[in-house]
Amino acid sequence: MVPTHLGNLSNLQHLAISSSFDTLWVRDVSWLSALSSLQYLYMESVNITSTSHELFRAVNMMSSLLELRLISCNLRTLPPSLQLENITSLSVLHLSGNPFNSSIPSSLFNMSSLTELVLSSSSLRGPLPMLQGGNLCKLRIMDLSFNYLTGHITQMLDTLSSCSNHVIGKLSHSIGKFNSLFELVLSFNSFSGPMPVSIGNLSNLALLDMQGNTMNEEIPESIGQLTQLSYLNLYQNNWEGTMTNNHFHNLTNLASFYISSKPNSFVFKVTQEWIPPFKYLNHVEIRDCQVGPTFPSWLRNLTFLKGVFLENVGISGEIPHWFYNLSSQIWALDLSQNKLNGYLPKIFNFSNSPRINLAFNQLKGSVPLWYGVDALDLSNNLLSGTLPTNISKEMSHLTFLDISNNHLYGSIPLAINKIQYLSYIALSNNYLNGSIPMFWMGMGELRIIDLSNNSLSGEIPASICSPSSLVILKLSNNNLSANLSSTFQNCTSLQTLLLGNNRFYGSMPKEISKNLPFLEDLLLRGNTLTGSIPEEVCGLHFLHFFDLAENNLSGSIPTCLGDVQGFKLPQTYLTRATVNSSLLYSTHVELMVKGRITEYENGMFVHSTIDLSNNDLCGKIPEKLTELIHLGILNLSWNRLTGNIPSTIGSLKDLESLDLSRNHLSGPIPASMASMTFLSNLNLSYNNLSGQIPFGNQFDTFNDPSIYEGNPKLCGKPLPTNCSSALPGNEEKGGKHEDGADEKIERLWLYGSIAFGYITGFWLVCGSLMLKRSWRHAYFNFAFDMRDKLLVLIAVNLARVKRKFGLERN
């Protein structure tokens, strides 16, 4: 803790407190008010636990203060009623890096003595406050970058211009009268509207940074009047119209220039014979604008040029020979995503270890050998031939090599092993064959290997994980074959492992969580793996892409998958992986979604995924899986799963794709599924599900009956079978009840009729004999006579039979 007795130093003029490692904190700031002679107060990375009201109340008592810098001090608010009226001589106010999460108090813009105001990276929101005339007239540096500010900047800039006593014309054209402004940084906010025409009158402006806003309309030609301007950044806006020679007419001191337009509707058009007035330009970056179709010849005379970035600017044709003459001074070159064609020079020397990106063009020829290059990206071109065997000799300084998506063939040369500082190698989507060389032990800096989509065969070398820095390994879509149960035993830093569509066999390694503790992406689809899914996989705490589809796995789904924290993370952007301090790897991953392969690339939202389809898994769906509330894709189709769909499956609020088809699931579709409002793909076909299909929310959009087919006991829309009630089976039960009642009544009628007939017949016969004697005698006489006649008839017929058989014997 910062000691409070510092307040006893009444004659102290300079106080600087900062922390780089250990946490410093200030609980009570009242002692600051006792430092009446303090002129410079600097605190950085000091946790000030007092409220902002208490802090600024104490600061306001320091009447001699000239500079106040409170950087990253965990200040939570900027009080709307902030008052610093007692500090009349304050010239520097630096409050960056504090999570204010509030608007800018208007009082900050009423301080006439300020020359420097820095409020960057402070979570400031809302529009800029209205600036009163005569304030901030001494301001030379203003930095409001990396906030969430909105609205137009015209009012602020126009009011700053009123610092002059001779305002001519409308206020919107008088901005240039504010001659003291030296730097204006408004980057990474949400400012919109046009750039004021009168900005060209800011004659002392040396730095203008408006990157990352939504500025639109045309850029005024008056910007070419800023004779002192050395840094101009108009990157990542929505500019429209055309930028011509006139926009640079007097920019003689320009050293760095950046511009891009998000809608790709901006044209950078200068004449071919134009000679730029800025002779000392060393960095030019133009992206997503229309510069072509011809290669910009105005770069020819810029002898101090070190960085050239012309990405997606519509230039075509061959790279002119004069441009290669700049190789001795270039340190960064990006001509990617254009329509450049022709052949690259096979051998070339570079002096400054440049990073060169010529990806996504139509360049032909063999892989060039350019001596001195630090990074080389020739991906997505038309290169052919084999990889040079002397690549390590000619390009020994390489840290980044990407020749993916070309037409290369042959084997991977062993000489690559001698490129000791290589961090990234991508040879994917070619026609390479042979085995993976066993040369990885000498490449201690290697972080990323991508050999996917080739025709490589054989096993994976045990030394492939010898570089302890390896984090990404992609070998999918080859003909590799190995027993995975004994592979990848030393890959302790690996985060991404993609081995899909090969011929790997065996069971999943039981020590997977020990050997691959930091694994995030595991894709093994399309192999011949057997055995069960080991519970040890649940020890991969960072796992969020899990694809074991199209194998021969058996057994049950581990319940503990519901405890893996990686699956519980919300959706996030697919970000670039760092190769080294200056290079980023464009991350991409292929996932099966809605029955087709979908490639996710940088900047795309991705969900956590579990795909265990097309195996031989059995048992129930673990209810524990429904605790993965941010799971985005769940595919368990084409297995032998039984039991009910978990009733709590509606807890998967972020689920976008659910496929449980081709199993033996039974019971109803849980009503809770209607609350899964992000669900866009559903397949429950070919199970034994019964009852009514839920309705409401997303289920009202599932109009394709095929997603429920093969479940004869299901009813409700979109199936033709109607349900009389939301509860399944009510109609059937009612029918059975009515049929049973009818049968009971019919049976009663039958028994009653028999009884009635028996009683009636008994009394008609027997009753009459008992009551009338003459009838009784006549009845018995008749019965006796009939008996006698019957006996005589039997005796006569019996005698005839005997005689007949006797004659036949004779």
Image: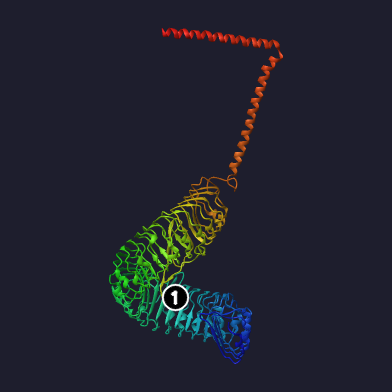
Visible residue check, residue 689 = yes
Which image quarter: residue 29? bottom right
Judged from this view, the residue extending furthest toward the right is 771
Q: Which residue: 43% across, 56% down? A: 549
Q: Is residue 552 left or right of residue 798?
A: left
Which image quarter: residue 755? top right
Q: Is residue 447 left or right of residue 731?
A: left
Q: Judge whether 603 appears above or below 250 on screen.
A: above
Q: Where does the image place residue 688, in percent across and percent down from the top left?
A: 51, 47
Q: Where does the image place residue 545, in percent across and percent down from the top left?
A: 46, 62
Q: Where does the image place residue 628, in percent across and percent down from the top left?
A: 53, 60
Q: Look at label 1 and name its amino acid.
A: Ile
Q: From the image, which quarter does the N terminus lie in?
A: bottom right
Which image quarter: residue 597? bottom left
Q: Which residue is mark 1?
A: 259
Q: Judge whether 13 appears above or below 418 on screen.
A: below
Q: From the image, which quarter does the C terminus lie in?
A: top left
